[in-house]
Image (cartoon, grey):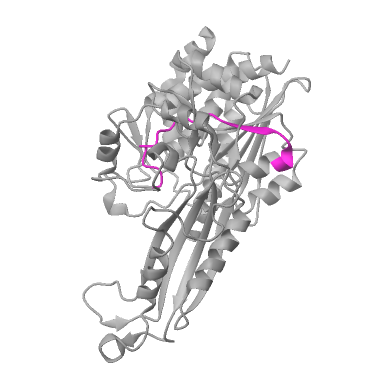
Amino acid sequence: MQSWSDYQQQHKDRFLNELLELLRIPSVSARSEHKEDMQRCAEAVKTRLLEAGADTVEIYATAGHPVVYGEKMIDAGKPTVLVYGHYDVQPADPLELWHSGPFEPTIKDGKIYARGACDDKGQFYMHVKALETLVQTNSLPVNIKFIIEGEEEIGSPNLGIFVKANKELLKADVILISDTAMLSINTPSIDVGVRGLSYIEVEVTGPDRDLHSGVYGGAVANPITILAHMITSLHDENNHITIPGFYDDVVESSAEERAELAKAPYDEATYKKELGVKELWGEKGYSTSERTGIRPTLELNGIWGGYTGEGSKTVLPSKAHAKISCRLVPNQKHEKMTALLIAHLKKIAPPYVTIKAEEHHGGDPYMTPVDSIEYRAAAKAIETSFGKLPIPVRGGGSIPITALFEAELGCKVVFLGFGLDSDNLHSPNEKYDLVNFYKGIETIPYFHKYYAEMKQ
């Protein structure tokens, strides 16, 4: 609608400056030293929601970081859209690889560089500005609620508790999330599903203290060596995961779905160049897009032990540690897969070490039916603003709370992401294209319009 476009064009510089202010707050949920920053960011989100036109905004304390809830209710007879996002961000390490300060947002070549630029401050803020656009042009067609949490990057440990305790407050017809990506600005897509997650930490102990590697080497098992052998055994020569029962619950994608995935533009040379690798690696028998969307994975996220400081110290270490994550696909359940992984590691551990493993966090996979009103409204919104229908794809990442949302609130989740896989999420130099940011603000009002019409 022309009034939306005119308003957004008139205020685009202010929209951007407001986002840059949010990005300057180091809201790192994983680090205790940022507790005050988390509260400060929650307060900033509350202020922006009120300024955008929300009638009520509250900050709810949890056992961890606070949840921000806001709403604009115009008519009980109209459908209600619940917008979910998160204001917490990943740690910025390693700092030396950033080209500019991670919390000093820098615009270069039409891109915002900052931690959280895409994941997820830039994306949830599009919804705040879409609300403002609709309120200021007196054209809001639905009721809108917001739930913006501060613990997504650590697995949303307290959000489930909050949701279960506030079902009436959060009651909605659909949940709208922009924490996913599209193929490109020229080839729009919509994630029809996200993978689940099982994330554990394992500790392997040999001797009860670090030993002299000359005196004891060759006589006592080295925990780092043992852990390395154990991890190596988790994949076979075809990069197939070897844990018994790992694939038992996997719903194999049909030939039709694999054919649809293959329609997405893909240039392997460009893909490798962007990642700085010479060759790709993955499960035999599947394409790159299938490996990152419809297949489960097991990845080593970190490994450490022994002496890693400057210079040399010839020790045979007492302990070795690793962080391991599995991405899950329908119908794998994260509780079952976590138990399976931990049990397998304990089983294959040799008798000359002891092993301790614990879960950090997890979540189940989620799928949005492409024939649902929710998906059709999102697809029509994309088609209107981009001039072409989006391609349905599977997202490789995880949003742990999505399956719980549907189970507790009884409504579907639809993903309307505007980031790119190349936006360096969780990596140094995270970025978000300005054109994608503004395109999201342009598109979201159309979702509300079309969803209201389809629900009549």
Q: Is residue 449 visible?
A: yes
Relative depth, front residue between 30 and 280: 280
Q: Is residue 421 magenta?
A: yes
The picture places residue 361, in percent across and down from the top left corner, at 56, 56
Total residue callouts = 0
Q: Residue furthest bottom?
A: 215
For the C terminus, the quadrant is top right
Quadrant position of residue 330: top right
For the N terminus, the quadrant is top right
Q: Is residue 392 magenta?
A: no
The picture places residue 218, in percent across and down from the top left corner, at 30, 86
Specify the principal SS of the magenta part: loop
Q: Residue furthest top?
A: 2
Q: Which residues are magenta?
A: 407-426
Relative depth, front residue between 397 and 296: 296
Left or right: where 318 falls relative to 194: left
The picture places residue 427, in percent across and down from the top left corner, at 36, 47
Relative depth, front residue between 293 and 444: 293
**Residue occupying image coordinates x 58% and y 17%:** 136
Quadrant position of residue 388: top left
Seen in the picture, residue 70 relative to 159 is either above or below; the reply is above
Seen in the picture, residue 140 relative to 199 is either above or below; the reply is above
**Residue occupying image coordinates x 33% and y 89%:** 219
Left or right: where 102 falls relative to 200: left
The picture places residue 168, in percent across and down from the top left corner, at 78, 38
